[in-house]
Amino acid sequence: MTALPQYGKHVHPSETMRAVVIDRYGGPEVLRLTTVPRPVPTRGQVLVRTRFVGVNPKDVIVRKGKFQIATGKKFPLIVGHDIAGEVVEAGPGADLNKGDLVYGMINDFAGRAYAEYAAVDCQQLAKAPTSVELAVAAAVPLAAQTALQALRDDAELKAGQNVLINGASGGVGVFAVQIAKILGAQVTAVCSHRNVDLVTELGADSIVDYTKTELVDLDERFDVIFDVFGNYCFDDLRKLLSERGTYVNTIPSARIFKDVARSFVRRKRAKLVIVKSRRDQLEWLRQQIDAGRLRVVVDRSFPISDVAEAHRFMETKRARGKVVLAVD
């Protein structure tokens, strides 16, 4: 059996686990469930017995090889980022304990969450919310932290400001609508007609049905535009920004990097959110969930053996909220 490259020497010599790996980049068919060595936690890490993992567009992009400049060409690779489970072993210097129920996001670019066990840096994890099941907690980390970092950290959204969220019914969008409301903003949500009721329930103040209205035709001005889908660019929507407004995109591209660089000499700014898992943000999200202020929307769950089908569903871009894999 070949040890996986991302674990290097830090694998248990006798213990194994099930994991979803890819041996090449490609379509959903390249995902396969197999047996690999179990990792061993190093300094500052814990070994998490994974119960559920969230499925994200980033997982699909990694599987396709669109980020292979970062993920490399050494196979097999375990993909996936969102994780929820139980700590079963603590490495030296770890500040989480055996038996803790945790959730978080693995910051490695390829990820390694689609597995029965994962060795994860403690600072990328936090205690899981107590008001929801672990299956629901697994849907939170990447998407909710993306929304929080885009709106609060990058755009510096303030109470009373107006924000436009393009892609309001997707995995990131459902959190963005609610987080913007928690921050005190007025929210205009962009979605299709079938999702109007959902985003209204989540707190959107007004709705734009993209099947009927082009965003570029809007007359309103917004302090923040969060382009979750990334199907527009800064120049397309710049006229919709207030004098010192901020446009935030989620999709890395040469165009957005150029727009960000140009923003240093412009009043209207373009930002790219590159999400990183942080304990303080996971704890803030846990508090909002347990207080009933932040609702987690899970469209459907698949067993890990149906991971290819889960990816096919993600690629339809029809998911309302998040998709979860059950590892057990």
Image (cartoon, rainbow, N blue to C red):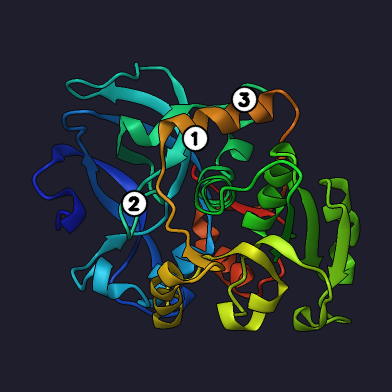
Q: Secondary structure at mark 3?
A: helix
Horizontal placement of 69 versus 248: left or right?
A: left
Horizontal placement of 168 versus 238: left or right?
A: right
Mark toward the viewer: 1 or 2: 1
Name the amino acid, label 1.
Answer: Gln
Residue located beneath label 2 in the image: 112
> Mark 3 or mark 1, which has the lower sequence index?
1
Name the amino acid, label 3.
Answer: Gln
Q: Position of residue 28 (x, y in %)?
A: 48, 74
Mark toward the viewer: 3 or 2: 3
Label 1 – label 2 distance at C-alpha: 21 Å
Residue located beneath label 3 in the image: 287
Q: Position of residue 32 (x, y in %)?
A: 39, 65
Q: Position of residue 62 (x, y in %)?
A: 39, 69
> Mark 3 or mark 2, which has the lower sequence index?
2
At horizontal 34% and vertical 51% (from top left) the residue drawn is 112
Callout 1–callout 2 Cβ contact below 8 Å: no
Mark 3 crowdedness (10 Å alpha carbons): few <14, some 14-19, many ≥20? some
At horizontal 37% and vertical 46% (from top left) the residue drawn is 106
Q: Position of residue 260 (x, y in %)?
A: 43, 70
Name the amino acid, label 2.
Answer: Arg
Label 3 – label 1 distance at C-alpha: 10 Å
Mark 2 crowdedness (10 Å alpha carbons): few <14, some 14-19, many ≥20? many
Q: Given the current orientation, which residue lies at the most extreme left position?
A: 9
Horizontal placement of 6 versus 180: left or right?
A: left
- Mark sitting on residue 29: none
Q: Nearer the viewer, residue 181 or 3?
A: 181
Residue located beneath label 1 in the image: 281
At horizontal 57% and vertical 45% (from top left) the residue drawn is 152
